[in-house]
Amino acid sequence: MLQIEEALKIIRNQQVQVKTETRELSDCLGFSLFNEISAPFDMPAFDNSAMDGYALCGISKEYKIIGEIAAGDESQFRLSEGEAVRIFTGAKVPENTSAVMMQEKTKVSGNKLFIEQPLKHGQSIRKKGEELKKGEIVFQKGYTITPAGIGMIGSLGIDKVEVFKKPIIHLITTGNELVKPGTLKKGGQIFESNSYALDSACEDFGFSCKEKKQIQDDFKAIKNGIKDSLNTADILILSGGISVGDYDFVKQALEENGVQEHFYKVFQKPGKPLYFGRKENKFVFALPGNPASSLSCFYIYVLPLLYKLSGSVKKGLDRLNLPIAKDYDNKSDRPSFLKANIQNGFVEILDGQGSSMIKSMALGNALVFMDATISVKKGEGVDCYLIS
Ligand code: AMP
Ligand code: MG
């Protein structure tokens, strides 16, 4: 059976065809840059005041106030030694300004200004180009735009940004036993929850499912559902029906749709019956139906491909090596992703590691990777994948 690292390598090595689009700046959150962005001008573009106060010429204790400059004013002043202007935060400082003194440390009498604190040359002046020089690269290609990134790009005067398109995701859940939350369930039925979890996992990382379908364990229906999705989706995620039961039709339905298998079954817990395939430029993951398995496989295997398809430089979940809070014996004979919680710099492996158990994942914030049949002593470092 395939090892985890081999499966991940197969995903990493996929050649993908990315698409690009130009978006309004306000609509760019979570998109990755297709081009690097460099500064079109110095930032700040002019020396300006960091305070509400007085711009001063020369270092002294007393000045003559000769006028006022507000933010946005095109300053006409040229100060001479011993002169000051009233100035406000962000306003362009006049020529010959030695320093700005905040108003709280001054006294005014008529047009006389008295400074009540020692002054330093250059104090409270934001210098032209101190953050960025014209032409300097601000963001590399593949930078995934954050709220601060949007602010930064806006401050450069850019309102339209060329970004990678995000992949179109379709989600198909399969199972006769599944009924929608909020409806009545009969004996033997369970509430369908994977589509909710997987959809919101996509959302959590800035992706969204275009279409969600719930299909019975019916070969023809599954085959048709896959066919339809492959017409429009860039990536199709299925849940359930990929194991070896008599009603597990997904693998055959994928084959009959011309999807080429890249791997099936990974030596891991949870999520052994994980399938990954491709048809031309469309990718397919079939995740095991157990709720914790499907979500764990999403985080470890699907997310890296979503990032790749969206042009991001990110490779997957953020990882940390942290000391374990208590001794832990991994009794599984397979390498495991264990539901865990990081708190105060330590990671605790949670109760409820069953593949069907999602409560521990919901209460935790990490998956800990641990080799098969290994004992880890309190304080030893373990590899944590951060899920929130
Ligand atoms: P399967 O992979 O189809 O054999 O399903 C494995 C287990 O996961 C079974 O107990 C299913 O009832 C459960 N399961 C499958 N799909 C879902 C789903 N969408 N929501 C919640 N549980 C599911
Ligand atoms: Mg099933």
Image: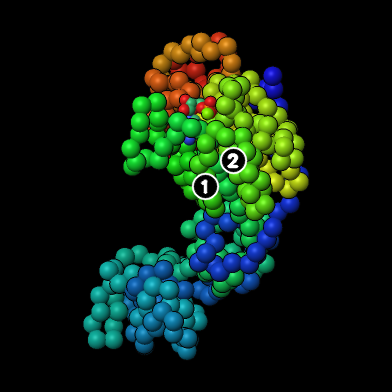
User: Where residue 276 appears, x then y in whole percent?
Assistant: 67, 34
Q: Toward the viewer: 56 or 71?
A: 71
Q: Between 287 and 161, which is closer to the camera in this rendering?
A: 287
| Residue beneath disc 1 | 212
Q: Is residue 354 left or right of residue 118?
A: right
Secondary structure under badge 1? Answer: strand
Which of the colour schemes (rainbow, by chain, secondary structure, one colour) is used? rainbow
**Residue 53 vs residue 152: left or right?**
left
In this rendering, the answer to whether 216 lies above or below 32 is above
- Name the residue type under label 1: Lys
Considering every residue shown, the one lying at the far left of the view is 109
**Measured along the vertical axis of the image, is residue 148 above or below residue 341?**
below
Q: Position of residue 78 (x, y in %)?
A: 48, 86
Seen from the viewer's position, the closer of residues 4 and 69 is: 4
Tell me where residue 11 sits by quadrant.
Answer: top right
Would you name the residue on which mark 2 appears? 221
Are there few (<14), some (14-19), or many (20+) residues within 10 Å of tag 1? some
Is residue 364 in view? no
Is label 2 in a helix, a strand or a loop? helix
Split into 4 quadrants, where in the image is the C terminus? top left
Q: Is residue 372 visible?
A: yes
Q: What's the residue at 63%, 71% (across, down)?
A: 40
Q: Is residue 19 rendered to the left or right of residue 77?
A: right
Q: Residue at x 39, y 73 (%)?
A: 89
Left or right, residue 332 beside residue 165: left
Number of other residues with Cα within 10 Å of mark 2, as a class: few under 14, some 14 to 19, many 20 or more: some
Question: Nearer the N terminus, badge 1 or badge 2?
Answer: 1
Tell me the kind of residue under disc 2. Ala
Where residue 263 sits in the image (x, y, percent)?
A: 70, 29
Work out whether 96 lies above or below 372: below
- In the rendered image, residue 108, in percent from the top left (x then y), is placed at 25, 79
